[in-house]
Image: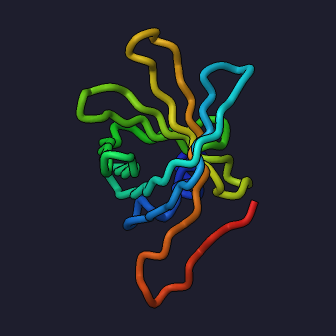
């Protein structure tokens, strides 16, 4: 019962409806000793059963739809185990409950080296309804 209560407290509101975030910066961790920052415009839409990531590229927009397969709470962090259209496993990890929601960690395995790649998407909540104030968190 304690675990169920913890899960209910930790689940963000996007499981109830739709949450949209903007990610202007991406931080890549190819290994533990270095990281790279890139300015990449992304929109991340969380829905009850899927996560849609729209990335602006020089050729247009790249749309990735991740179907949520499983939801876990590990080390006080909400984790989504997802599958993309190619049936590859993607893991999305949120900050700890007591941390500000300023980033989303995205994990996948490199198809060539099988190395685990971590990408940190720095996020700002977007305005969905024009009557709502814009919600931007400073970190």
Which residue lies at the image location 46% right of the left edge and 53% below the top edge? 42
| Coloring scheme used | rainbow
Query: 71 or 108, which is in the foreground?
Result: 108
Residue 113 x/y as whole percent = 46, 9
In the rendered image of this protein, does residue 60 appear above or below residue 75?
below
Q: Residue furthest top?
A: 113
Which residue lies at the image location 39% right of the left edge and 46% below the top edge? 57
Q: Residue furthest front?
A: 58
Q: Is residue 15 left or right of residue 74?
A: left
Query: 61 or 78, which is in the foreground?
Result: 61
Q: How many marks?
A: 0
Q: Is residue 41 left or right of residue 96?
A: left
In the rendered image of this protein, does residue 10 appear above or below residue 132?
above
In the rendered image of this protein, does residue 126 appear above or below residue 39?
below
Specify whether residue 73 is in view.
no
Residue 134 falls in image quadrant: bottom right
Q: Quadrant of the C terminus?
A: bottom right
Q: Is residue 86 left or right of residue 128?
A: left
Residue 82 x/y as whole percent = 37, 36
Query: 126 or 73, which is in the foreground?
Result: 126
Residue 11 x/y as whole percent = 52, 55
């Amino acid at each position: 019962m304690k675990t169920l209560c913890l899960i209910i407290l930790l689940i963000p509101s996007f499981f109830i409806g739709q949450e949209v975030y903007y990610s202007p910066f991406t931080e890549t961790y190819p290994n533990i000793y270095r990281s790279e920052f890139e300015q990449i415009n992304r929109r991340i839409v969380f829905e009850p059963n899927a996560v849609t990531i729209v990335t602006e590229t020089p050729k247009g927009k790249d749309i990735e739809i991740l179907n949520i397969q499983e939801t876990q709470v590990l080390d006080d962090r909400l984790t989504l185990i997802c599958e993309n259209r190619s049936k590859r496993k993607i893991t999305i990890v949120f900050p700890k409950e007591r941390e500000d929601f300023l980033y989303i960690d995205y994990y996948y395995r490199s198809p060539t080296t099988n190395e685990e790649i971590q990408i940190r998407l720095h996020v700002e909540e977007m305005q969905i309804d024009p009557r709502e104030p814009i919600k931007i968190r400073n970190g």
